[in-house]
Image (tube, grey):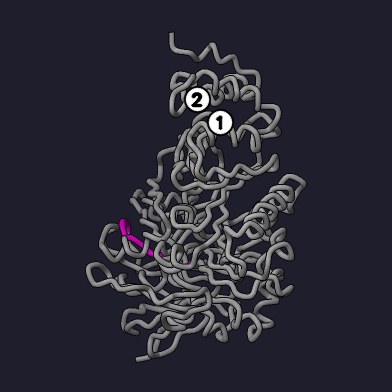
Amino acid sequence: MGLKIISKDEAASYINNGDILGFSGFTPAGAAKAIPGALAARARKEHQAGKPFKVGIITGASTGDALDGELARARAVLFRTPYQSNRELRDLINNGEVDFFDIHLSSVAQSIRYGFFGKINFAIIEAADVTEKGEITLTSSVGISPTICASAQNVLIELNKSHPAALRGIHDIYEPEDPPHRKEIPVFAPEDRAGSPVITIDPDKILGIVETDIPDETSPFKESDDKTETIGRNVASFLLSELERGTIPAGFLPVQSGVGNIANAVLSSLGGTVPQFRMYTEVIQDSVITLMKNNAVSFASGCSLTVSKPVLKNIYGNLPFFKKRILLRPQEISNNPEIIRRLGLITINTALEADLFRNINSTNVLGSRMMNGIGGAGDFTRNAYLSIFTCPSTAKNGTISTIVPMVTHADHSEHSVQVLITEQGIADLRAKSPKGKMEEILNNCVHPDYREQLREYARLGGHTHTPQTLCAAFGMHQHYLKTGTMKGIDWGTYICR
């Protein structure tokens, strides 16, 4: 029996209210784009008829508007995990209309296998090729695709012709055994292969194939500005100094970098400053491809190709070159703590806010409103050879200091963060007491507009081991909510009487 070609509407018709769906994709790269829209249309019809229709959504990370946006606008999302970046979905989460479970990306696949999310009814996968034997060649990402294909009761495939079948070979599909039978993961260098180039499943699980030709919804990140470029130069300068004093091996170490314009600026600054290096990361961005073509990056292992359309076209036009230099893995492997520690990664991630004692908030604005999620930053930070966080020293045109007395939500504790870098400078926080960390951050990372204000706060704590003053710890946040700026606070207002 051959594989069945169906319409996107037929695919959507198989899905029922309350079903739990696992989607391919890691960022908009490789995410389903046709079936979610048909499912959203069906949800609207059901709602108009007075019937409930919502589904649980598990993905690798964020997706595109064609998935998260469409289903959010249709009010068709029962719950969402583990990461998102869609404005309309974010609003539903923050308004309490959608439950959101924020978890480390390395944990998603194993949590599915362990049964923590319940039964997965459908896996919805984007593929560049599918064979009669059930061999699936993925497109521009891997995410949780191998696990949801194996765990789901049924599989629906979007066969997307905007991605060439010749991608076969750029993926490394490997799933570890579950405890108590798990053995070491056989990755000892970023270029090591551990598994297969394809996902192989029982063809009878494939309910149908929807043919599409829809490009990834990725777009270029914002251009670097003076502030982000200065942060990038500070990171490069710090790593070069560590290399020169011998704390980083002479041949350098693999690098992991977060996503966005700061990450792009950091990577661009590293090229030509430090020795040629390899990457073991989640997201391969435009800057990585540029460095690769300039021979500054020799190899990149990641989970997705999240690049602009012209860059992806260039990669697909030069596949023999890039297939020797790029490997896409499941996030369970790209973010695996065992491998991160074994390879000795230098990790560089971005903070929303940091406090004087190096705790990092990367998820919640003012402690309560979810931005995107923790993503993979924790996977890398907690297991790094050297963990770095970057952020601009101010936000909102200077009305917010990103360095505060106490973060309103802690994602990465002081025990995991070794270096904090802003456009103001570098705070090396290794082997320092809480007071030592505080002085390092005050002297090097805080914007001058807030430095004396934060010193006044530090003096409130007196001679305690960690000079926090609980009544005033969130004073700058409260002052901002009252006045629209964190500047000009009267600390006396927030002292307990």
Query: Furthest residue to the right?
Result: 226
**What residue is shown at x 50% (from left), y 44% (from top)?**
431
Name the residue at 71% across, 60% down.
Answer: 268
- The mark that comes first in sequence, 1 or 2, is 1
- Asked if the magenta segment contains residue 19, the reply would be yes
Which region is colored magenta? 17-25
- The reply to whether dot 1 and dot 2 touch (C-beta < 8 Å) is no
Q: Position of residue 71 (x, y in %)?
A: 47, 55
Location of the N terminus by quadrant is bottom left
Could you say which is closer to the camera, residue 419 or residue 131? 419
Q: Which residue of the protein is positioned furthest toward the front in this rendering?
A: 245
The residue tagged 1 is 404
Front-lying residue, 379 or 372: 379
Q: Is residue 210 left or right of residue 306?
A: left
Which residue does the numbered mark 2 point to in the structure image? 474
Tell me the number on the disc at residue 489: none
- Res 178 seen here: yes
Q: Residues within 10 Å of mark 2 (few under 14, many from 20)?
A: some
Q: CA distance from mark 1 to mark 2?
A: 8 Å
